[in-house]
Structures are given as C-alpha cells and as structure tokens.
Image: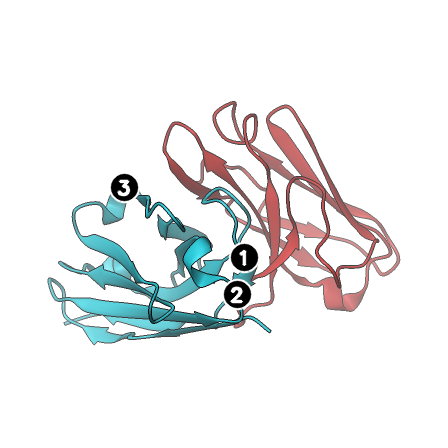
Amino acid sequence: QSVLTQPPSASGTPGQRVTLSCSGSNSNIGSNSVHWYRQVPGTAPKLLIFRDSQRPSGVPDRVSASKAGTSASLVISGLRSEDEADYYCSTWDDILRGWLFGGGTTLTV
Amino acid sequence: EVQVLESGGGLAQPGGSLRLSCTISGLDFSASPIHWIRQSPGKGLEWVSTISGPDYLMFYVDSAKGRFTISRDNSNNTVYLQMNNLRDDDSAVYYCATVEAGGYADQFQYWGQGTVVTVSS
C-alpha cells in the first residue's frame, strides 16, 4: 500500500475533462514538490509535470496540475484516446528520506 | 540529446547477485543525481535508490538497505547498482533516471528503457 494515495482508475469520454488526485501527508506532499509521470504499458515512464505545476517542453497546455496542502491534482482537458495511460504522482519524503510514488491511476478514454 | 542506457539485467537465483549499470550521455553527468526505480510485472513504480551529484549522498528504500549498493564513476558517466542477496520480489524492470544538474529531490526528467531482472530458482 502506497504512502501516496491515488485512485486506481479513472475514465472519461473524448473532449471531457478529468481530474486525477494524489493524497499524502505533511512530510511528503506538504513539504516538497509533486511531480507527475505518464506511462503507456510496456514503455518507460515520461515526466508530465514537475514542481507541482510546471510542464516540460512538449506537454500540451490541456494538461495542468496543482497542489494544496497535502494533496495534488492532475487535470487533463479535451481528452483524447492517446491520453489512455497510467499516471503516477511522486514526491520526496522528509521523514523516510526517500522518494515516494503513488500507486498509479489507469486512465481510460 | 540526453541518452540513458541501462544494462546488466538477467536471471539470478534467490540469494544471488547482479550488478546493474546506467550510462548517461548528453548532460553534465557529475552534477546530476541518478536514481534507480523498478516496476514489478503488473505493478506500479517503486523507487529503489538515489546517488546525488557532487556530494555523493546515497539513499535507499528500506527493502534494499543492507543488500543493494549504489555507486558512480564520473569518469565513465556510469552509475552502478550492486544487488546482493536477491529475493523473488526483486524481480522487476529496473529503470535509471536523472535530471540535469539538479538536486536529489528534483524530478526524474530523463528515463532509460529499463533492464529486466528476474530472480528465480
């Protein structure tokens, strides 16, 4: 069971907006930046969002993220079939002195 | 272009050892933290170990402490993960990841394609 909690699945129809959540605690999300990764099964993960809300070059602006307290959210607007993937949140934990990943959310479009 | 290449995976018996390598090109290697992250079949991502850039700080997930050792050779742009006393639950795809000239708590910007470790008798 992950220290960072993500719902195991989410779904939407093309064009819709979907929000994926990630819940933690004061020693991790509450104290450090949250990063989001996207993984198509069978391939390596890719950085989707860094430092809570920053998009790397090449990530479209229909992907956004935010953080409030000990929770973070990833929002994908204008859903497309190619958005189908697993999405992971991640952050550093000051007490464990290590990195955490959420259990991942499988998005179905 | 940054390239991350893992190698060294394979089949090992329970209690055996493997050494994984991660060679990175296209960035300031000596200033960059390097991480190992694994993924067991059908499961999520699990961080395993980190070695920081200039100051060589090392961190491990609890299940790896005392069994795995991370090290780096800046002259060869390579990081190693020595894995001893392997267990069945160490079977996974092992990914190497980094961020250019970042801190050990910065995002995993670049990832390799992974190397497969199978522990089985």
Q: Tell me which amino acid carries mark 3.
A: Asp
- Of pointers 1 and 3, the one earlier in the residue sequence: 3
According to the picture, the residue beneath numbered tag 1 turns out to be B100
Q: Residue at x 15, y 60 (%)?
A: B84
Instruction: Compute the Cα span from label 1 to label 2.
Output: 6 Å
Helix, strand or loop at mark 3: helix
Report how many numbered discs are placed on residues in the image. 3
**Quadrant including the C terminus of chain B:** bottom left
* Badge nearest the viewer, 2 or 3: 2
> Which colour represents chain A?
red
**Chain at tag 2:** B
**Quadrant including the N terminus of chain B:** bottom right
Q: Residue at x 84, y 51 (%)?
A: A77
From where the camera sits, is residue A14 visible? yes
Q: Position of residue A29 (x, y in %)?
A: 56, 31
For label 2, the crowd category at 10 Å Cα-Cα, with few meaning under 14, some 14 to 19 and many 20 or more, is some
Q: Is residue B56 above or below residue A86?
A: above
Specify the label residue B62 is tagged with.
3
For label 1, the crowd category at 10 Å Cα-Cα, with few meaning under 14, some 14 to 19 and many 20 or more, is many
Q: Tell me which amino acid carries mark 2.
A: Leu
Instruction: Compute the Cα span from label 2 to label 3.
Output: 30 Å
According to the picture, the residue beneath numbered tag 2 turns out to be B27
Q: Position of residue A85 (x, y in %)?
A: 64, 62
